[in-house]
Amino acid sequence: MKRLIIADVQSMNNNGRSIGHYFTVAANYNEIFSKDYDVFIAGGPVYYSNYKHMVKLKYDTYSLASLLINKLKIIKNCFDLFSQVSNAIIIFQCSSIATAYLGIALCPCNINVYMIQYNTLGINSKLKRFLFKLAKGNIAGTICPSEKIGEAYGLPYCVVPDYILTQNRFKSIHFTNDHVDYDFGVFGIITWSKGVIEVAAYFAHTNYRLIIAGHPSDNDIKEELINICADSPNITVIFDYLTTRKYNSYIKGSKYCILNYTEDYSQHSSGVVFDILFNGKPVLGRKCKFLSFITENHIGVVYRKLDELPLDELLREDIYHLYLENIKKYLENHRNYEQTLIDFIGSSNKRS
């Protein structure tokens, strides 16, 4: 059975944790491809205790470390990866892509490299385009969430969502209003660009039950949130790194989840929207291109300003259950993406 490696050569380590979508994507792709390939996860020490079937890379990178040192570690991880792997397929996670181009440019000829690209940031400057040009001949294809992104890289591409719902995962979803403690929820790393402060201010001193849970990106936003919510008993704030179990539990415990992303943040796709839908919950999101499918499939509401949300109507049982039924229909079709990705990796022209 041919080997397939899902690689995170950046392996960002934040106090012993991997922050972001990297573990989730690794687990998702592992489940998708394990029927047809011998799948390994490639990552630095932050991955070691989470995965047994691994290609162990030597280095993690750290947000407070020197930028130059981090980039050197990424390049060394690329070399380390290629030295351990032959006659295989490698899917590079979307992390420090431009630096990874240097390592990929020297990729052995018996390895087929694919890159996950959520946006066009990997080619948005002269330097990045130069580095991409060096690596392009060694890249077999791009996995991306839109035709526009795929076309921009000028390689064979496959359009699939950030996360793909597998058949096993679909069977575990409960499309129900049972065990719900909150009307609305905001979850994940708490940053200014996610519009969390605006959500808290809007819901403060109302009768709507709101939960905000996640680790604050800095002390200023933490203090701001504490001040806003101090006298609002309807708002629950939990400052914590969320384990996958807690994260999913909080989503399931809310009727709706809010993505109030600012304009800059909303320019790229977000896996969080699929975390919400995969837990059977509707999405309320600020208008941006990557959320257009929410409106098209009637699985939530897309708004320009928070005061446009028809909150009382959303909490009506008949309206809420209609959204749940629409999510179920959407996710039934969503499972086709699994085979689309398998076919793309299996049938794309391989490098000689």
Image (cartoon, helix red, strand yellow):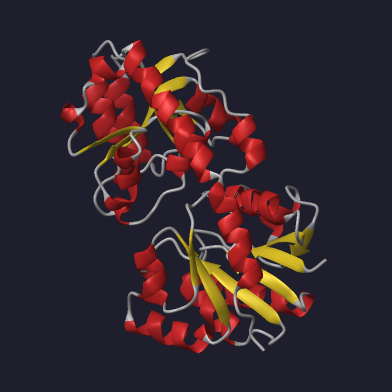
Report x, y in % for residue 67.
48, 70
Instruction: Give the answer, above or below, for where 260 lies relative to 35.
Output: above
Residue 298, image quadrant: top left
Q: For the point 51% across and 23% down, which residue is it?
A: 175
Q: For the point 34% across and 45% down, which residue is it?
A: 293
Residue 173, image quadrant: top right
Asked whether, in this view, residue 94 is left or right of residue 234, the answer is right
Asked whether, in this view, residue 292 is left or right of residue 340, the answer is left
Q: For the point 52% across and 31% down, which residue is it?
A: 279
Residue 187, image quadrant: top left
Instruction: Give the answer, above or below, for where 344 lies relative to 296.
Output: below
Report x, y in % for residue 68.
50, 75
Q: For the point 54% across and 69% down, which residue is it?
A: 115
**Is residue 234 visible from the viewing direction of this image?**
no
- Quadrant of the drawing holding the N terminus: bottom right
**Is residue 115 visible from the viewing direction of this image?**
yes
- Quadrant of the drawing holding the C terminus: bottom right
Q: 298 or 82, which is in the foreground? A: 298
Report x, y in % for residue 94.
51, 63
Q: 169 or 322, which is in the foreground? A: 322
